[in-house]
Amino acid sequence: MRLSGGYNLFAGTVLTVLAETFHQYATVLATFLIFNILDWITGTCKARFARLESSIDGLKGICKKLGYWVLILVAFLTGHNLCALGGEIGVDLSAAGYIGLFTLAMLVVNEARSITENLVEMGVAVPEVFIKGLAIAQSKLDVSRGEASEKKDDSEKEEDSEKEEDSEK
């Protein structure tokens, strides 16, 4: 009885943290889960059509999907905690709140592209507009990620020059 009480407390705590962290992203996370399943199914079908089906490759694919979920959890929790810590120590880390969102967006696009590639290799006629749309989304996310790091570098340079000016006075 004591063991199950500890387990229930632990499981309840984990579920509470997850619900608080991800409640507003439930639809996107459900979509990502569906994309994970579809990518695994289309990848398996593609391998079977090419007579390259392997249980080891299937297991690797499942482990990779689990890794994506770990990455999402780590990205959201890291962003959330950096924002909170930044407020406590007086450093503006508010941009860190977007780490989880950008990670999730990149993974959703990646899964959609993988599903599309699997379908194309199986001979399914995928509209070119969909393929190009995913490529545009990927490039915009890449550019946004690059611009965010460039803005960070610029703000750090400004802070350094302000510190130099203050030290000269």
Image (cartoon, grey):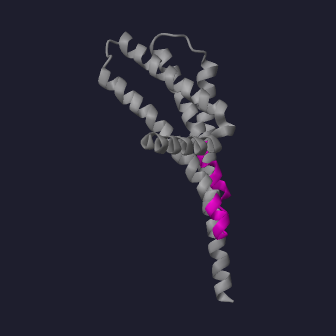
**Residue 163, relative to residue 152: is it above or below?**
below
What residue is rendered at 30% in x and 19% in y? 54
Q: Which of 46/97 is in front?
A: 97
- What x and y, as percent, mark residue 100? 59, 45
**Residue 151, relative to residue 89: is it above or below?**
above
- What x and y, as percent, mark residue 83? 64, 58
Q: Which of 164/2 is in front?
A: 2
- What x and y, as percent, mark residue 167? 64, 86
Is 27 included in the stretch rendered in magenta? no
User: Would residue 11 appear left or right of 147 to someone viewing this image?
Assistant: left
User: Which quadrant of the structure image shows residue 140?
Assistant: top right
- For the N terminus, the image quarter is top left
- For the C terminus, the image quarter is bottom right
Q: In the image, which residues are magenta?
A: 84-102
**Residue 141, relative to residue 94: is it above or below?**
above
What residue is rendered at 53% in x and 32% in y? 110
Q: Which of 159/90 is in front?
A: 90
How many numbered marks does the figure carry? Answer: 0
User: Would residue 143 appear left or right of 59 to someone viewing this image?
Assistant: right
- What x and y, as percent, mark residue 17? 59, 45
What residue is rendered at 62% in x and 52% in y? 80
Is 96 included in the stretch rendered in magenta? yes
User: Which quadrant of the structure image shows residue 24?
Assistant: top right
